[in-house]
Amino acid sequence: MRELSLKNCRLDGRYDIRETLGQGSYAEIYVAHDILAAPQSPHSLIVIKALNVFLQNDLDHDLEKTLVENFQNEATALDRVRHPNIISRLGHGSARDLKDTIFHYLVLEYLSGGDLSKACRETDLTLKQALFYLEQVCAGLGHAHQNGIIHRDIKPQNLLLTGDRKTVKIADFGVARVAQSDSPITRVGTNMFAPPEHSPMFSDHAETLTYTELTPAADIYSLAKSAYVLITCESPRFFANQPITELPFAFRQKPWADDLVKVLNKATQHDSRRRQQTVVEFWQELSSIKGFNAIEEGAPPEISVRPHTLPQAHIAKGYTPLAPQRPRFNTSQDLKLNNLVGANRAPLVVPVTKVEINKSPVAQPEIIEATQEPPIIYKPVKKSRPLLKKFAAFIIFIGLFAGILYATHNYLRGRGILPSIGNPFKQPTGTANGDVFLRSTPNTNNAPIGTVTKNSRVKVVGSQDGWLEIDVIEQGNAGSAADSAAHGWVSGKYVDIQQ
């Protein structure tokens, strides 16, 4: 057995391997910290699933080729069924460990809430909680089936929870198959949850099965056994490779017990054609016991609960429907690593002695060996003084230029060449120095429209050809201005402008 040497290492210049989560026949699972992710990112901690074809010491070229193809197919399946309730692939790559062993890896999201099997062991789930989780599993699994992918290993251990335990995601598509595939059915899964058509227990007795074609009903069988665990928090060991016929004694008196057994019994029939044929059909029958749950808890039935609604997804923070670049993995023989050097070789992982979790350094173009000196931290040079000098010189120049313009203007205005410039935003006021007619235009060719009496206060709003356009603020002699108007034109000689 040749395990990968990855502990306390940095992979691809960004993933600091923290600890081992688990190990399969040809895969090793690690939790890692992405040093390029923001601290508040839901993907600052990720999972590295590394394919180790040398793990069992029985490698030949054909086996390695099959393992690599299956590993790439897993990535393809995850991208094909991307859904809020299916674990997301975040990236991939190839590298060499500290012992120069080549391996491929997938980067998956890390779900810190554990699996549903663990949740059932820690505390008994209520029927409401179990149905809440099962609806999400049905939503994700139904989406996978719509995209032609059969999971083939649905079980509570592969149903993972987010840290807040509000979202369930289906994991481990390593043995997933494309529906209606012509390739022979391999025996996979856990005996307790696997349907007869691909259960290892039936590997030598396939002829005893009535119908052996692999369809989505295979996942429905496993989903029903998983539902038994979530609702009762007990293992279905008494129904291994058998239909479910009853619930544990503590649940047999529940008002929904008979209805639940009927749904689960149908879903776990040996003949897959007698089961529910779609996940939606299974959920529609299962969700009908929601009403019993409300009665059992003493609450009125929920009006919104309908037995024939589609299972609804539950979206957690950080989900995106966009998949990363599709991987292209090769075998070690195809890569001919022993004959390649330099940039053409797979990158080597780097040992690290300290992981700075809350720091996101800039990605480095080359690998830093552990024996090198610590990187130099460059501090920006302070340039405040030159900047202040330039700014002060600019202000002085503007001041001199403005002073020259002002002096020139005063000189020309004093010679009468330029008129006086007043405040363009202030409207001058004045006083009528006699009784005068208001006209609609600045000339005497039209009839008066009113009268402005002597000493009336006016506001000048415009001027043209010696005429002023005014607003009458206050009549000087309101009693004698019966035909007074509030606005019009008057000759400028009748108005004394206030300076």
Image (spheres, grey):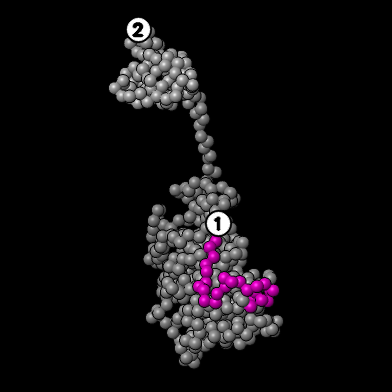
Of the pair 41 and 396, the residue shown nearer to us:
396
The residue tagged 1 is 42
Disc 2 versus disc 1: distance between alpha carbons? Answer: 76 Å
Task: Name the residue: 54% across, 58% down.
Answer: 317
Find residue 5 and report its horizontal and vertical position in percent.
54, 61
Secondary structure, mark 1, is: loop
Q: Is residue 320 left or right of residue 488?
A: right
Tell me if residue 452 comes above or below residue 236 in the rendering.
Answer: above
Judging from the image, what secondary structure is the residue with disc 2 in? loop
Front residue of 2 and 36: 36
Q: Amino acid at mark 1?
A: Pro
List x then y, in percent, for residue 164: 61, 61
Q: 100 or 254: nearer the eye?
A: 254
**Up/down of 161 relative to 431, above or below:** below
Residue 418 appears in the figure: yes
| Quadrant location of the N terminus in the rendered image | bottom right
Q: Residues within 10 Å of mark 2 (few under 14, many from 20)?
A: few
Name the residue beneath numbered marker 2. Answer: 415
Look at 55% across and 77% down and name the residue there.
Answer: 307
Up the image or down, 96 lies above or below 426; here it is below
Q: Residue at x 61, y 76 (%)?
A: 291
**Kind of residue at disc 2:** Arg
Q: Which residues are magenta?
A: 292-316
Q: Residue furthest top?
A: 415
Q: Is 293 in the magenta?
A: yes
> Are the residues at dot 2 and dot 1 in contact (C-beta closer than 8 Å)?
no
Instruction: Measuring from the top left, give residue 321's x and y in whole percent.
Output: 45, 61
Residue at the farthest left position: 445
Image mark for residue 483: none
